């Protein structure tokens, strides 16, 4: 009877996504542990992240239980299609529990006709600000964003073949020229930060860790019916450039739009002006300097748009990992003495209204208490979640007489689209990952200082040559 009700529920929803927990083969969890984990994910989206982003942007889903035979058959069917880099984890086929989520490759605000073509762009924007904390020990972190520095370490480790020209600060600037440059850079070197789907099928993005789709002509072939439905544009390079330009323009307009009229919780915002508005390593910034221009105009983001809300959540990282790590150590020391307090401190949930209320304190004056340290640790986890989230832009062509005030519409040169913007990948970052983040931060900065900045600075280069083991350079102030 329960199985029949579940099947009816899924059929009624018509177009949904099922998400199953995955874990390494040697870390099998019980059904109750899996149910608890999934419930934490749903509650965190519902009671916490919805407060930051707003009702229309967050789709937390619900938990359902499926017949085990159906789950096993589904697992066998999709296993050959899973990316090789994801196959180190097994999909849960023993509990039957899964999350039922809306298909975010489709506009969410209204029901579409079945035959209507769909286009979806998934962007993982990463961290959109430069640390402003006084705890930062390396001056380079006040000048170059983490993403741009990390690119060089990833290339050195063989993760990517070449560094991307994309800089998150350009995308988060609100300046259309900078945003266009950032999106074009993502299209040139997608890595795992951009994917494009047509009717739910991936047509552009990273195939695996080494091979990225880079054929713009093929992409233009897919996109031409969306942007030039009358087929009035000739083929060739001009056509490709024009279509890509149209795509970038539409993405920019949707990112700057506000499709959520409700206020996002009671959180006092962190002043964006506290951080530098540009990154010295940005290819856009370097081009300006080469042209004799030294000032970047930052238009700022509309307060209601998803990028603005994402940036605000990211900026809960007010102390930087260098200022946060000693507070994490304070909490760890307390838990060693009083391990039974872990549940009281809500480190592993429940993620309810009470958990959210504790995040509202934005003070940075350390009073030496465990309560202060824990609040900053939890805020940091929220910030890390926002830094790694994905934005889904779903588009569908519409005729002029189909557009209404209830639908969000964006105009291109020769077409118009109904659209929705959503945020996903909002699982709270693990408390246990903080030591790894601290270590990784040091590796990123030290590699950049030694192998990138040193090449641009002859004085630094000589210092490193004198001592190859040196990873810290001190300057007189």
Image (spheres, rainbow, N blue to C red):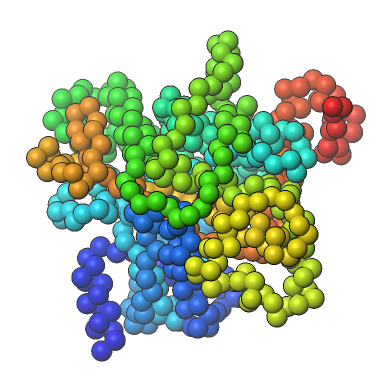
Q: Position of residue 404 (x, y in %)?
A: 15, 43
Q: Can residue 323 be seen in this view?
A: yes
Would you say 404 lies left or right of 290 here? left
- Choose top left, top right, bottom left or bottom right for residue 455: top right
Residue for point 61% across, 35% down: 275
Q: Position of residue 171 (x, y in %)?
A: 47, 34
Residue for point 66% across, 38% down: 132
Q: Position of residue 150 (x, y in %)?
A: 64, 41
Residue for point 23% across, 33% down: 411
Q: Where's the N terminus, which quadrant?
A: bottom left
Would you say 18 lies left or right of 390 here? left
Would you say 393 lies left or right of 117 here? right
Q: Can residue 41 be seen in this view?
A: no
Q: Position of residue 34 (x, y in %)?
A: 50, 77
Residue at the left extreme, as displayed: 401
Residue for point 33% across, 24% down: 241
Residue at the right extreme, as displayed: 466
Residue at the top extreme, as displayed: 292
Q: Which of 272 and 357 is in front in this view?
A: 357
Q: Nearer the viewer, residue 135 or 446?
A: 135
Q: Where's the C terminus, which quadrant?
A: top right
């Amino acid at each position: 009877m329960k199985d029949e009700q579940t099947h009816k529920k899924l059929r009624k929803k018509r177009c949904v996504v099922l998400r199953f927990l995955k874990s390494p083969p040697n870390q099998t969890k019980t059904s109750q542990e899996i149910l608890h984990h999934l419930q934490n994910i749903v509650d965190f989206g519902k009671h916490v992240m919805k407060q930051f982003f707003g009702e229309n942007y967050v789709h937390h889903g619900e938990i359902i239980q499926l017949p085990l035979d159906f789950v096993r058959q589904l697992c066998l069917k999709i296993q050959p299609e899973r990316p090789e880099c994801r196959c180190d984890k097994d999909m849960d086929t023993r509990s039957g529990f899964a999350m039922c989520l809306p298909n975010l490759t489709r506009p969410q605000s209204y029901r579409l006709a079945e035959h209507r073509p769909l286009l979806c762009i998934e962007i993982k924007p990463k961290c959109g600000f430069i640390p402003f904390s006084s705890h930062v020990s390396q001056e380079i972190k006040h000048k170059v964003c983490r993403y741009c520095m990390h690119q060089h370490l990833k290339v050195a480790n063989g993760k990517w073949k070449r560094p991307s020209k994309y800089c998150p600060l350009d995308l988060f600037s609100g300046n259309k020229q900078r945003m266009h440059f950032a999106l074009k850079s993502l299209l040139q070197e997608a890595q795992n930060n951009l994917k494009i789907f047509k009717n739910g099928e991936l047509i552009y993005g990273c195939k695996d860790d080494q091979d990225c789709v880079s054929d713009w002509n093929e992409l233009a072939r897919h996109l031409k019916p969306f942007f030039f439905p009358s087929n009035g544009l000739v083929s060739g390079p001009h056509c490709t450039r024009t279509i890509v330009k149209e795509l970038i323009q539409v993405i920019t307009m949707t990112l700057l739009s506000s499709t959520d009229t409700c206020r996002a919780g009671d959180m006092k915002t962190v002043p964006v002006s506290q951080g530098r508005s540009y990154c010295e390593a940005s290819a856009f910034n370097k081009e300006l300097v080469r042209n004799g221009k030294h000032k970047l105009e930052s238009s700022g983001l509309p307060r209601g748009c998803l990028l603005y809300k994402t940036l605000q959540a990211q900026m809960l990282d007010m102390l930087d990992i260098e200022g946060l790590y000693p507070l994490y150590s304070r909490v760890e020391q307390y838990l060693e003495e009083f391990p039974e307090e872990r549940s009281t401190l809500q480190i592993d949930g429940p993620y309810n209204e009470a958990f959210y209320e504790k995040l509202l304190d934005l003070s940075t004056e350390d009073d030496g208490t465990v309560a202060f340290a824990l609040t900053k640790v939890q805020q940091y986890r929220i910030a890390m979640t926002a830094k790694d989230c994905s934005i889904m832009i779903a588009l569908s062509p519409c005729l002029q007489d189909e557009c209404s005030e209830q639908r969000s519409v964006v105009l291109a040169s020769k077409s118009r689209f109904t659209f929705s913007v959503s945020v996903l990948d909002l699982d709270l970052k693990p408390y246990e990952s903080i030591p790894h983040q601290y270590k990784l931060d040091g590796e990123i900065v030290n590699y950049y200082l030694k192998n990138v900045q040193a090449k641009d600075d002859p004085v630094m280069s000589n210092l490193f040559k004198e001592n190859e083991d040196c990873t810290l350079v001190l300057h007189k102030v």
